[in-house]
Image: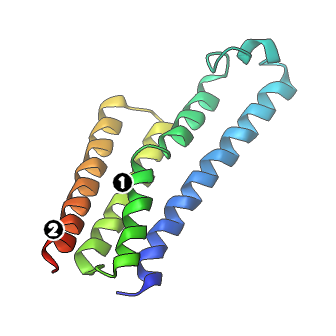
């Protein structure tokens, strides 16, 4: 596996993060311009934003939870050169689940479906960390 192979899912995850940030910013600016939200409405917290803006903002914030552990793992995999096909497939599965999670979060926001997708990503990421740890600790 090449460095590029492992960086591609990272690039997709980073693109998702920036897309959510941009969509959140557009929604916030639009809310101010339309007069729907005034600065004092959100001065002490996020509760004053319209529902859709809040959904995008929360989806953006979620990109700094599990994905942080994903970024660290991929960096370690590249540094230690233990990347293999299984880790690469799991990396793509994780990123696809993150894309699905963001989609559900910013559309119908079905909490139960979103939770299952999040849990799936958690299991995949945990499996990746376990595989990585075993490879490092056993020299495999």
Per the rendering, the mark at residue 134 is 2
Per the rendering, the mark at residue 74 is none
Q: Residue furthest bottom?
A: 2
Image vertical order of residue 25 relative to residue 15, above or below: above
For the N terminus, the image quarter is bottom left
The first of marks 1 and 2 along the sequence is 1
Residue drawn at 28 percent across, 79 percent down? 82
Q: Quadrant of residue 36?
A: top right
- Of residues 110 and 1, the one drawn nearer to the viewer in this rendering: 1
Q: Does 55 sit left or right of 127 as displayed?
A: right
Per the rendering, the mark at residue 97 is 1
- Residues packed near mark 2 inside 10 Å, few (<14), some (14 to 19) or many (20 plus): few
Residue drawn at 67 percent across, 44 percent down? 23
Q: Does 77 sit left or right of 55 as displayed?
A: left
Where does residue 20 sit, x and y in percent of width and height? 60, 47
Residue drawn at 49 percent across, 45 percent down? 64
Any part of residue 90 in sight? yes
- Residues packed near mark 1 inside 10 Å, few (<14), some (14 to 19) or many (20 plus): many
Where does residue 107 sit, x and y in percent of width and height? 50, 38
Q: Quadrant of residue 48?
A: top right
Where does residue 63 sit, x and y in percent of width and height? 49, 46
Q: Marks 1 and 2: which is nearer the front?
A: 2
Disc 2 is placed on an element classified as helix
């Amino acid at each position: 596996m090449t460095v590029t192979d492992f960086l591609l899912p990272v690039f997709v995850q980073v693109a998702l993060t920036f897309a959510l940030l941009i969509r959140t910013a557009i929604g916030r600016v639009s809310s101010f311009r339309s007069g729907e939200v005034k600065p004092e409405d959100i001065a002490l917290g996020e509760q004053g934003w319209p529902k859709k803006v809040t959904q995008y903002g929360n989806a953006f914030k979620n990109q700094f939870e599990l994905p942080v552990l994903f970024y660290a793992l991929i960096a370690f995999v590249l540094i230690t050169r233990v990347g293999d096909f299984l880790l690469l497939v799991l990396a793509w599965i994780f990123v696809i689940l993150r894309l699905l999670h963001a989609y559900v979060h910013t559309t119908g926001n079905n909490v139960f479906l979103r939770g299952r997708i999040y849990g799936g990503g958690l299991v995949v990421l945990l499996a990746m960390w376990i595989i990585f740890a075993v490879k490092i600790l056993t020299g495999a």
